[in-house]
Image (cartoon, rainbow, N blue to C red):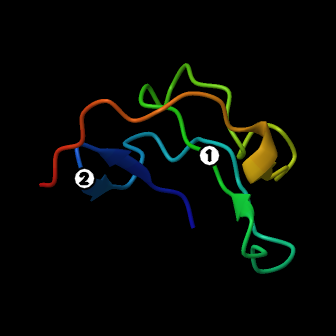
């Protein structure tokens, strides 16, 4: 039910706490579910009531990408 992602590895929360979240519907083609890189402190789609980001709201460019 609850998990966290640490460096592309999925762990269950050690104390069984977290933010329960379920998608109300599948994402549309121009919608993104955003996650912060610091899960315990990041405000992202999980804490924002499942709000998704549409493409027009994304600013910036990827300047470096690294595959695992």
Q: Are the residues tagged 2 and 1 within 8 Å (C-beta)?
A: no
Residue 13: where, in percent of width, then height?
42, 46
- Position of residue 38 relative to residue 46, above or below, is above
Classify residue 38 by image quadrant: top left
Q: Residues within 10 Å of mark 1 (few under 14, many from 20)?
A: some
In percent of the image, x 54 and y 58: which residue is there? 2
Which mark, by number, is residue 34?
1
Return the residue nearer the eye: 61 or 17: 61
Residue 15: where, in percent of width, then height?
45, 40
- In the picture provided, is 6 more to the left or to the right than 34? left
Return the residue nearer the eye: 5 or 55: 55
Q: Earlier in the sequence, mark 2 or mark 1?
A: 2
Residue 17 visible (yes or no): yes
Task: Give the secondary structure at mark 1.
Answer: loop
In percent of the image, x 31 and y 30: which residue is there? 63
Residue 54 visible (yes or no): no
Residue, disc 2: 8
Q: In the orientation shown, which residue stands out farthest toward the top?
A: 41
Residue 54: where, in percent of width, then height?
79, 52
In percent of the image, x 42 and y 31: which residue is there? 37
Return the residue nearer the eye: 59 or 42: 59
In percent of the image, x 66 and y 55: which residue is there? 33
- In the picture provided, is 39 more to the left or to the right than 10? right
Of badges 2 and 1, nearer the viewer stands 1
- In the picture provided, is 14 more to the left or to the right than 18? left
Q: Residues within 10 Å of mark 2 (few under 14, many from 20)?
A: few
- In the picture provided, is 18 more to the left or to the right than 50? left
Task: Give the secondary structure at mark 2.
Answer: loop
- Distance from Cα at disc 2 to Cα at disc 1: 15 Å
């Amino acid at each position: 039910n609850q998990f966290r992602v640490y460096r592309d590895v999925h762990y269950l929360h050690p104390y069984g706490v977290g933010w329960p979240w379920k998608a109300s519907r599948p994402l549309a083609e121009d919608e993104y579910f955003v996650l912060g890189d610091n899960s315990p402190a990041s405000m992202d789609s999980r804490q924002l009531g499942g709000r998704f980001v549409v493409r027009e709201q994304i600013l910036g460019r990827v300047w470096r990408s690294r595959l695992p």
